[in-house]
Image (cartoon, helix red, strand yellow):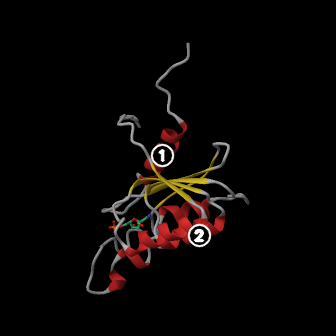
């Protein structure tokens, strides 16, 4: 008889998003994303980080600063955008993105334009911000389904 405690598809893909988030250098919020085709093939992954060539030792990680130029927000590339940009293929039509944090309005525009049809998200901690409210409005208009991930409360330990 087959093993029963294998990872279901949703768990596997959100697990990969969570593992990708572990690559983030952001001291406050690590985000990971995994893009999956209609037939459950992993197409791309990403996490939030500074753009290529912009050293994550030199660019700021602060959330606030007297000078906006000394805070992270003008520079950091979101996990969802990185996952889109890391994709080397040509067809994201009807793909699903698993993300550990609900997408912002800017990533949402790019997700919609790329053909992503579903967003499965873990945290929605910024749900009351204009960015997320706008993101949901656009997803609703564009027919992009968004579904909270159902936690299974299982710990998976990886010994590295
Ligand atoms: N959906 C998202 N994906 C992301 O990759 N991010 C990134 C941008 C920042 O590096 C960090 C959020 O920082 P903070 O405001 O929680 O300290 O997560 C943020 C959001 C929120 O919309
Ligand atoms: Zn974003």
| Beta carbon of the mark 1 residue lies under 8 A of ligand 1 | no
Residue displayed at 54% across by 65% down: 140
Name the secondary structure under disc 1: helix
From the image, which quarter does the C terminus lie in? top left
Outermost residue on the right side: it is 90
Residue 160 position (above or below residue 139): above
- Tell me how many marks there are: 2
- Residue 23 lies, in percent from the top left, at 43, 54
Residue displayed at 50% across by 32% down: 7
- Residue 100 lies, in percent from the top left, at 43, 54
Q: Where, by quadrant of the figure, is residue 61 drawn?
A: bottom left
Residue displayed at 41% across by 68% down: 56
* Callout 1–callout 2 Cβ contact below 8 Å: no
Determine which residue is flagged by label 1: 14
- On residue 110, which mark appears? 2
Q: Is residue 59 visible?
A: no
Outermost residue on the top side: it is 1
Q: Where, by quadrant of the figure, is residue 28 drawn?
A: bottom left
From the image, which quarter does the N terminus lie in? top right
- Residue 45 lies, in percent from the top left, at 55, 54
């Amino acid at each position: 008889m087959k093993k029963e405690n294998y990872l279901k598809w949703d768990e596997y893909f959100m697990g990969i998003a969570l593992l990708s988030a572990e690559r983030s250098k952001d001291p406050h919020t690590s985000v990971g994303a995994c893009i999956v085709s209609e037939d459950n093939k992993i197409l791309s992954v990403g996490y939030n980080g500074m753009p290529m060539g912009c050293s994550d030792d030199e660019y700021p990680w602060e959330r606030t600063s007297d000078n906006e130029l000394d805070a992270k927000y003008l520079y950091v590339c979101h996990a969802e955008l990185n996952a889109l940009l890391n994709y080397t293929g040509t067809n994201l039509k009807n793909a699903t993105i698993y993300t550990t944090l609900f997408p912002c309005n800017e990533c949402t525009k790019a997700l919609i334009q790329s053909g992503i049809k579903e967003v499965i998200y873990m945290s929605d901690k910024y749900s009351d911000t204009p960015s997320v409210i706008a993101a949901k409005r656009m997803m609703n208009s564009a027919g992009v389904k968004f579904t909270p991930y159902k936690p299974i409360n299982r710990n998976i330990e990886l010994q590295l």
